[in-house]
Amino acid sequence: MTPSDGCSRRRRAVLVLATIWLSGCATVRSEDGRLATCPPVVEYGRKFQARAAEEMALLPQGSAVSEMVSDYAVMREQARVCVGRLR
């Protein structure tokens, strides 16, 4: 056995352990035997949506918050499409 054999085994063992630990972070839930990887989409009532629209109208033009909310709307639509594909 050469000195590099032990180092190689140790390196492989570390890689295997790292893979096992990281795979534990990749959780998915099963729905009807299918893997669901789409985030849930929270539904908001009409009154709440109207209140949010009124509050958004009070923000200054080009505010950072309004840009973030716009991005959030895009993500919500992407999540809806994702869930629709799973059904």
Image: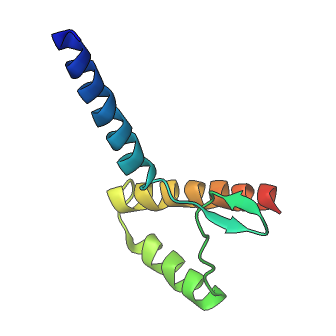
Residue 5, how many percent across, how many down? 25, 15
Residue 12, how many percent across, how many down? 33, 28
Quick one: 49 or 42, which is closer to the camera? 42
Q: In what quadrant of the picture does the N terminus appear?
A: top left
Q: Is 36 located above or below residue 6 in the figure?
A: below
Query: Who's the residue at 58% across and 63% down the image?
Result: 39
Side of 31 relative to 58 (left or right) = right
Quick one: 50 or 29, which is closer to the camera? 29
Question: Residue 2's quadrant in the figure?
Answer: top left
Number of residue marks: 0
Query: Who's the residue at 36% across and 50% down the image?
Result: 21
Query: Who's the residue at 77% across and 64% down the image?
Result: 33
Farthest-out residue, bottom? 47
Side of 13 relative to 86 (left or right) = left
Side of 22 relative to 87 (left or right) = left
Q: Is 15 located above or below residue 45 in the figure?
A: above
Q: In what quadrant of the picture does the C terminus appear?
A: bottom right
Query: Who's the residue at 46% across and 62% down the image?
Result: 69
Question: Residue 50's quadrant in the figure?
Answer: bottom right
Question: Residue 11's quadrant in the figure?
Answer: top left
Q: Is 72 located above or below residue 17 in the figure?
A: below
